Image (spheres, rainbow, N blue to C red):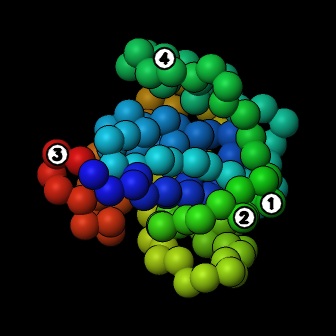
Amino acid sequence: MQDKKTVLVLCTGNSCRSQMAEVLLNHALGASVRAISAGTSPGAKVADGAIEALKLLGLPTAGLEPKDLNAVIDTPIDLVVTVCDNARETCPIFLRPVPSIHLPFHDPHGEPLESFIQVRDDLRNRLIPAVRAALELGARA
């Protein structure tokens, strides 16, 4: 079996969308993908709403914390996914060419739990198939 592909989900604060995306990708595509996330200007902690939205699906949240892009910049990356316009505009240049896709999602930070749940579901519905297609993974990956 091939090594897992590493997907970097990049956002500004790495406290909502990218954290949920990391967990969702690892859950759905974990046999083929290792998802990590980082922020161009990370916040102090992962938003409570993001944690709760993931827990409502029974997904693991232990150890989630915002990471600066510099913490993962030397990691071999197979695909970069920017989930906000600011991250897309400030996405760094990697040492080797790395394919990237941009899928913007609403920022639920500071909104009620229902907003986090809507973004979580949007991530599941749009991001997982987009990553699967970008990495040319089979439907079961």
Question: Mark 1 packing: few (<14 Cα in 10 Å), some, or many (20+)?
Answer: few
Q: Nearer the viewer, residue 21 or 138?
A: 138
The residue depicted at 37 percent of the width and 40 percent of the height is: 30
Please give the residue where the numbered disc 2 appears in the rendered image: 73
Residue under label 3, please give it. Answer: 140
Residue at (74, 40) in percent of width and height: 66
- Dot 2: within a 10 Å radius of its alpha carbon, few (fewer than 14), some, or many (20 or more) residues? some
Per the model, the C-alpha gap separating discs 3 and 4 is 24 Å
Q: Nearer the viewer, residue 98 or 109?
A: 98
CA separation, marks 4 and 2?
A: 29 Å
Q: Earlier in the sequence, mark 3 or mark 2?
A: 2
Q: How many marks?
A: 4
Residue 59 shown left or right of residue 141 in the figure: right
> Which residue ends up furthest to the left in the rendered image?
139
- Marks 2 and 1, how far apart in space? 5 Å
Q: Is residue 26 left or right of residue 91?
A: left
Instruction: Measure the alpha-carbon separation of dots 4 and 1.
Output: 28 Å
Disc 3 versus disc 1: distance between alpha carbons? 32 Å
Residue 119, above or below 37 = above
Provide the residue designation for mark 4.
55
The amino acid beneath tag 4 is Lys
